[in-house]
Image (tube, coloured by chain):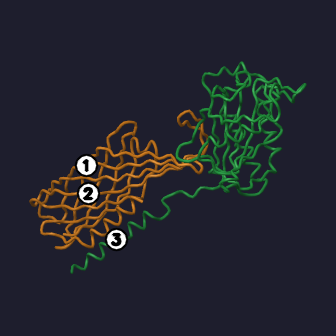
Chain colours: A green, B orange
Amino acid sequence: MNRKYPIFALLLLASALLFSCHPDYDATVEELDVAITQYDEEQDFSQLQTFYLEDSIVYINDEEAGSSVNVNHSQNDLIISLVRQNFLDMGWTEVTGPTDGQIDADVSIMLSVLETDVNNYYYYWWDWWYWYPWDWWFPWYDDPWYPGYPVWPIFPTYPAQGYTVGTLFIDMLNMNEVEIPSDDDSSFKLPMPWQGAAMGILAGSDTFLQQRLTNEINQVFEQSPYLLK
Amino acid sequence: MKKYIIISLILLATTTLKAQEGTSIFINYLPSMPMGGTADFSDNISPRGIDFEVERFLSEDLSVGFNIAWNLFREKIPEETFYHNDLTITAVQFHYTNIFPVHVNVKKYFSGQSDYIPYAGFGLGTSYNETRNDVGIFTLTEDKWLFNLAPEIGMLYDMNYKAWLSVKLKYNYGFKAGDFPSQSYLSLGLGIGLK
């Protein structure tokens, strides 16, 4: 038996260990924060001047799957005020509430936070559909209005995995071009000229969370210069 | 997972292989410097590299052999805005490139009376290439098999009748395929061989 063979094998083993020692970076919580936006390149944003912002955030969970996580709701006011301030800073005019039961704004801004991991984006829109106050925009609908069919618009899907618990969605609905059919059919039209998402790991103190939320929400607008008036 | 399989195979090979007459087996530590398309994605000199080689000497100054290697390059990209399909994304990115070349090679030795034997070689084969971009908790991965070549120059030191010491400079180039960019890097190999 050649005595060098065990030495050779040991060298190989040492090399294998060299490779297996932390080949991946150790990311901090902050380094996992992501700001994502998407917009409709066909949209002329100069035609959109006024926005309406709901003073609430929809928390999306999945009770059937039992996979929901209670997300900290204490940052609602901060989130809403940051979104409002960014739109105002970019020159938009806010329409503050329904007048005579109606709202006359070019776009409606919808805020929602995931309390469950969503691998299928459509789940999100299915839920979203129920809570939206369509009667403010289309008073000829009875309240509460139940559509009876899902909505399947085309939305971005992030490759490999879905959106995760804690993700904040900021979605812009162009109310000038919404078409709601009076009967159940597939001609429903929900134009979304702009969408933003801020995602990150929900960990750390309130101050830390607020700082990261502020950074990410501001970033969502900063990388959307076409919204500037 | 693939890397563990390959390492296991190499380990298995060393415990079962017997050096044949005129056959040498080598293992080299292979720190590498990324170039071209590899550097575009993960631009850091990498200490993580290894190759395993079996050489059959056809004559005193010519050998043919088989080489399998593994290199890992990585780079942390500070927070920046980039584009993916129709999405605009701002995040810190962690880039990783794994390259597994598999070559058949030929080496010409310039042996004299000295124990130091310089050589020039050329490898031809394929390589499995995987680029991975970790963004937040997401991972964007692309992989491709590329046509690959690898010229090298080096020197063997004839330690004794059983073993070699080897040092080499090896350039690895994988040709572009489809949207997957060409991959290239320069390696410094330091190793030992058994006769």
Residue A85 visible from this viewpoint = no
Q: Quarter of the image holding residue B164? A: bottom left
Give the Cα separation between the discs numbered 1 and 3: 26 Å
Q: Are marks 2 and 1 in contact (CB under 8 Å)?
A: yes
Q: Amino acid at mark 1?
A: Gly
Q: Considering the numbered disc 2 on the image, is that residue within a helix, a strand or a loop?
A: strand
Q: Position of residue A66 (x, y in %)?
A: 68, 57
Foreground label between 1 and 3:
1
Q: Which mark is residue A11?
A: 3
Give the Cα separation between the discs numbered 3 and 2: 17 Å
Viewer-proximal residue among B10 and A51: A51
- Residue A172 vertical position relative to residue A77 in the rendered view, above or below: above
Q: From this viewpoint, which residue is outermost toward the left?
A: B59
Q: Identify the residue at image location x=11%, y=64%.
A: B113
Are discs 2 and 1 located on one and the same chain?
Answer: yes
How many dots with numbers? 3
Q: Position of residue A4 (x, y in %)?
A: 26, 76
Q: Identify the residue at image location x=82%, y=51%.
A: A74
Of mark 2 and mark 1, the one earlier in the sequence is 2
Q: Position of residue A164 (x, y in %)?
A: 64, 49
